[in-house]
Every structure is written in structure tokens, then in C-alpha cells.
Image (cartoon, rainbow, N blue to C red):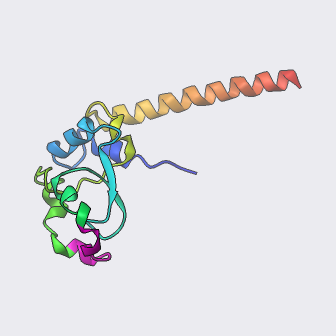
Amino acid sequence: CGVWVGTRFVATREANSHDNYKHKIVEATEEGTQVTKCFTGKDCRVIKNRYQEQWEDRQGEIKPFPFQMMVDSEKLDAAIRWGKTDLGFMPAGQISGVIQEVKSAGEVVRAIMEEAEEVLSRLAEKHLELQALS
């Protein structure tokens, strides 16, 4: 059991990704991501952009992994490194619609810990209530 929190950490001040990419994550709605093979040839959830939309009606032209990555290899770094969010690869999870701001990684970790402590506390209370009923 575990969690994937990559998108939340991409949208932190310390992340080594372009600010434009981080802001696209913050601006995204719950419908702002889509699973596509157009960048790598494998299913990957990305923030929608012009490049990805150009492949919508051309699914049959997408090559299998890793060959699709060679079709437009510069697109893989365009958003992450250079901030070209209309053309570049911006992997992002469904959580993008919930992220409201770029924070520090420390703030993200503290928030995760606080929420975990709250959940565990509530579970402990429920457990004690159920034990008292038995």
C-alpha cells in the first residue's frame, strides 16, 4: 500500500521544472488532464495542450514505446525545461484540479503529515467506540 504524489511535488518551489509547467498544474481543472500515448507511446496522464490535441484524431499514427518518443523528442523537454506549455510534455495526475498554489516541499510534507495524524486519530476514536459497544 502506498501513495503517488509526484504532481503535488512538481508544483513546489524546489522542483526542478519550469514555473510555466508548475502554473499549468495550478490552473488545471479536474477535466484538465487526459491519458494519451502521443508523447511516449505508452499511456500517460498529461495536462491537455495544443500538441496533445493535435494527436486526438491521429491515434493510429502513434508509434509504440519507445519509438514515439523519437517522433518529436524535443517535446519531452519543451514544457518541463523551457516552459513551452502549448507544445511540451506535462505529465500530471488527476490531483491537478485540486492543487491551488505552488508551495514549498516542506509545506506539502507537513500538510500530508497533519492530515495523516487527523485520519489516524479519527480511526482510533472509531475503534474505541466500537470496542465499547462490544
Residue 133 position by quadrant: top right
Q: Position of residue 123 (x, y in %)?
A: 67, 29
Task: Judge whether residue 134 is colored magenta.
Answer: no
Vertical side of 32 occupied by 114: above or below = above
Q: Residue at x 27, y 76 (%)?
A: 63
Vertical side of 103 occupied by 45: above or below = below
Q: Position of residue 35 (x, y in %)?
A: 35, 56
Say which quadrant the C terminus sits in.
top right
Q: Position of residue 92 (x, y in %)?
A: 32, 49
The span shown in magenta is 58-69
Q: How many marks?
A: 0
Q: Nearer the viewer, residue 111 or 89?
A: 89
Vertical side of 82 occupied by 63: above or below = below
Left or right of 60: which side holds 127?
right
Q: Nearer the viewer, residue 114 or 65?
A: 65
Q: Residue at x 19, y 46 (%)?
A: 21
Considering every residue shown, the one lying at the far front of the view is 57
Residue 56 position by quadrant: bottom left
Task: Judge whether residue 63 is colored magenta.
Answer: yes
Vertical side of 126 occupied by 93: above or below = below
Considering every residue shown, the one lying at the far right of the view is 134
Q: Residue at x 37, y 64 (%)?
A: 43
Left or right of 58: which side holds 4?
right
Left or right of 133: which side holds 43?
left
Residue 24 position by quadrant: top left
